[in-house]
Image: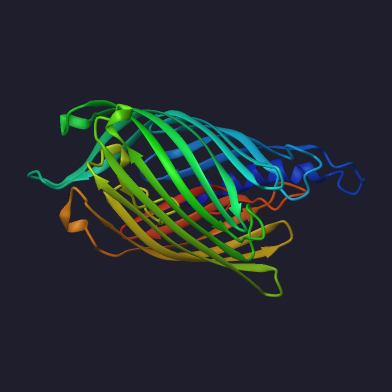
């Protein structure tokens, strides 16, 4: 099943992207906006078969700004065969010679997922469904050199129900303020080949913002990049930690999977905090590429105490394609295996 989905994805993906190159031999004036529509086809053990479309565009907010990276705007509409759906809008704007970096993100959907329960007679996975709406807006300002400081606000609304009433249904919302510091010496924001990205986020859910569970969360990431093979390829490494403090709601728990770490799609390992380290080799040829990656993760504060502080490995390979003519921005597909689990991931940009 997984191999057939992969072939189906590649066939549809290449038909859209390669089909746009028929007139590349004819010189054309560079367009102010590069618009692409990406098909989304994937599969994992939790959400099952996923399909949809992701239109996105890259552009300069100010055509005379030669320093700022191109801005990115897009949307994703995805449906899964376990009857989940997602509609999201994402925007990243780079302004005034990269002195300002702004973002706007909106997400709404219904996720039918599962979690592991062990404090009952027969430990097992139990299904749950969460109707979610998230709105996030924020900005960063260059302070000096490669240092930025920023502030963002995120509103989230959750309506969660559980199979067999294993937990009581809940309707909740949260209002988060996030203060962040960023050191960014990368040579490119979408596909760096050298430099560092070091970011510290402090998220607070204070009671005065009408949060039922007052809590705090600290997230730290350190990514580094090294060119290799005569600057054709890239070695990337990442350390990431997310630390929940106080009363962490179920919907705010950290789950191993996705970026940290690929190879886990069941949603089994979740807790108040997560740490991981991983590396990736990015091999490039023409407008395409292959990646190989591996890493280790651990969690703490799990509802299943035996999961705490164990090592959870993940490794896999992936395919990349750059659909844009003037910008290095890849999309692609990753396949990974973990501890008794596996996953297939559609990528918009690199994993980190």
For image coordinates 34% across by 59% down, the residue present is 275
Check the image and name the residue furthest to the left: 121
Q: In the rendered image of this protein, does residue 195 appear above or below residue 241? A: below
Determine whether, in the image, residue 132 is placed left or right of residue 231. left
User: Coloring scheme of the render?
Assistant: rainbow
Determine whether, in the image, residue 287 is placed left or right of residue 307. right
> Where residue 283 appears, x then y in whole percent?
63, 66
Q: In the rendered image of this protein, does residue 337 appear above or below residue 31? A: below
**Viewer can see residue 36:** yes
Q: Quadrant of residue 336?
A: bottom left
Q: Which of the two residues, 309 or 206, is positioned nearer the viewer here? A: 206
> Where residue 125 appears, x then y in whole percent?
22, 43
Q: Which of the two residues, 69 or 118, is positioned nearer the viewer here? A: 69
Check the image and name the residue furthest to the front: 144
For image coordinates 31% across by 58% down, the residue present is 340
Q: Which of the two residues, 341 or 223, is positioned nearer the viewer here? A: 223
**Viewer can see residue 266:** no
Check the image and name the residue furthest to the right: 26
Check the image and name the residue furthest to the bottom: 229
Q: How many marks?
A: 0
For image coordinates 7% across by 44% down, the residue present is 121
> Where residue 78 appears, x then y in whole percent?
50, 33
Q: In the rendered image of this protein, does residue 185 appear above or below residue 71? A: below
> Where residue 331 appears, x then y in whole percent?
61, 49
Determine whether, in the image, residue 8 is placed left or right of residue 171. right
Q: Quadrant of residue 57?
A: top right
């Amino acid at each position: 099943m997984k191999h057939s989905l992969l072939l189906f994805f590649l066939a549809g993906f290449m038909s859209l992207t390669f089909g746009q190159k028929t007139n590349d031999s004819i010189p054309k004036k560079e367009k102010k906006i590069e618009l692409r529509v990406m098909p989304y086809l994937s599969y994992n053990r939790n959400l099952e078969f996923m399909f949809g479309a992701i239109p996105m565009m890259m552009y300069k907010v100010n055509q005379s700004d030669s320093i700022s990276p191109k801005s990115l705007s897009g949307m994703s509409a995805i449906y899964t065969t376990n009857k989940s759906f997602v509609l999201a809008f994402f925007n990243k704007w780079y302004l005034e010679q990269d002195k300002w970096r702004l973002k706007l993100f909106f997400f709404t959907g219904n996720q039918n997922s599962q979690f592991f329960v062990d404090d009952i007679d027969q430990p097992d996975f139990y299904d749950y469904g969460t109707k979610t709406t998230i709105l996030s807006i924020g900005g960063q300002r260059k302070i000096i050199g490669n240092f930025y400081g920023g502030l963002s606000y995120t509103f989230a609304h959750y309506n969660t129900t559980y199979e067999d009433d294993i937990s009581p249904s809940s309707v909740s919302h949260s209002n988060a303020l996030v203060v962040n510091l960023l050191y960014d010496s990368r040579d490119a924001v979408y596909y760096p080949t050298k430099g560092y990205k070091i970011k510290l986020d402090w998220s607070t859910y204070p009671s005065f913002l009408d949060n039922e569970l007052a809590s705090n969360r600290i997230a730290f990431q350190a990514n580094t990049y090294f060119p290799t093979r005569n600057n054709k390829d890239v070695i990337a490494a990442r350390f990431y930690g997310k630390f929940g403090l106080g009363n962490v709601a179920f919907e705010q728990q950290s789950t191993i999977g996705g970026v940290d770490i690929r190879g886990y799609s069941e949603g089994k390992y979740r807790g108040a905090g997560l740490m991981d380290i991983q590396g990736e080799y990015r091999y490039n040829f023409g407008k395409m590429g292959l990646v190989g990656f591996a890493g280790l993760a651990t969690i703490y504060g799990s509802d299943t105490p035996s999961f705490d502080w164990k090592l959870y490995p993940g490794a896999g390979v992936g395919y990349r394609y750059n659909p844009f003519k003037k910008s290095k921005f890849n999309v692609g597909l990753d396949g990974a295996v973990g501890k008794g689990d596996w996953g297939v991931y559609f990528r918009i940009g690199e994993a980190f």
